[in-house]
Amino acid sequence: MKLIIQIPCYNEAQSLPITIPGLPRQIPGIDDIDILVIDDGSEDDTTAVATSLGVPHILRMPQHVGLAASFVAGLEACLKLGADIIVNTDADNQYHPDDIQALIQPILNGEAHIVVGDRQVASLEHFPPWKRALQRMGSWLVAQASGMNVPDATSGFRAFSREAALRTVVLSEYTYTLETLIQAGAKRMVVRNVPVRTHPQLRPSRLVRSIPDYLAQSVRTIFRVYAMYRPLRVFTAFSLLMILGGFALGIRFLYFFFIGQGSGHIQSLILTAVLLIVGFQTFLIGLVADLIGVNRQLMEEMLFRIRKRDFQRSANTHHTQTNEHV
């Protein structure tokens, strides 16, 4: 059983010497532990520092592509290296490395596909109140969209089984944390939560530049992914709102018509017709989107099978080359 700990980095030359040495080298149930650093086009000496710390695998992006793209590139690299379990952690030493064993245990036991480290944000004194509120709100929205209870949806400290990593497709350019959970719920993957410890922050978050920006990005991501996997529900909801509004205005017009004042409320009749027509059309769009969604699911299943075959081939080739080198 091979575990790879991947660390997305962007200008983390100062924090890596604190984070890397604390990572576990042995875990019960794991035969091999490797570390992968994804250098997201850093402008400092992140790659050189990682090399000096003995990191065996370094993936350097040609330019800064963002956290979501770095995360996906890391998953693919880990799969090619033959990982059975992938743990994603931050480079800023936020998470306690000794909790990796607890994080991967549900996967080792065959009880989960994805395990999320729950930082128990509400009780963290070094988190400002606004950040606690945002974390709780984000977790609640993701729970509603995914149908799963995830108390710390924005936690980047999480473990993936090989199958979960192969099935993960991230389209967001902002972050992967929310999208992967909604996707896991739609694909009926089992997600577990494990309490984890945290260290005081070494630096301010680079993801949360401002509260309005973070809220806008998060809500947009949640709505987009939910609409992608549950299009009929989304379009039906909008359709019902417009149809009910049309019926309400129609009843209002009929009331005035029967008391002899209908000529003064023609606008209500016109708006009734518009809302009913648009509502019906929106429902039809939802049906079409749902059919497209079925086709997308088939394509994702095909992609999963192709990736599984290709990554198994790459892992076998890497294993053979390693044995020949030895």
Image (cartoon, rainbow, N blue to C red):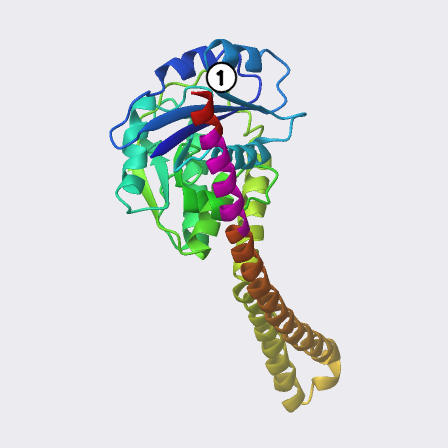
Taking the image as drawn, is residue 79 in sight?
no
**SS category of the residue bearing label 1:** loop
The amino acid at mark 1 is Arg
Give how far across and how far down residue 187 sits, in percent. Answer: 45, 56
Give how far across and how far down residue 193 sits, in percent. Answer: 32, 41
Q: Is residue 96 above or below residue 169?
A: above
Q: Which residue is mark 1?
A: 203
The front one of 325 and 237 is 325
Q: Is residue 269 left or right of residue 44?
A: right
Quadrant for residue 34, please give it: top left
Q: Is residue 189 above or below residue 317?
A: below
Residue farthest along the front direction in this orientation: 324
> At x 28% / y 46%, what residue is drawn?
110
> At x 56% / y 52%, what residue is drawn?
303
Taking the image as drawn, is residue 104 in sight?
yes
Q: Is residue 152 above or below residue 292?
A: above
> At x 52% / y 37%, what residue is drawn?
314
Give how far across and how far down residue 118 sits, in percent. Answer: 34, 35
The front one of 65 and 75 is 75
Q: Is residue 313 magenta?
A: yes
Q: Quadrant of the N terminus?
A: top left
Give how far across and how far down residue 156 sits, in percent. Answer: 44, 33
Quadrant for residue 283, please give it: bottom right
> At x 32% / y 46%, what residue is drawn?
112
The front one of 325 and 73 is 325
Quadrant for residue 242, please give it: bottom right
The span picked out in magenta is 306-320
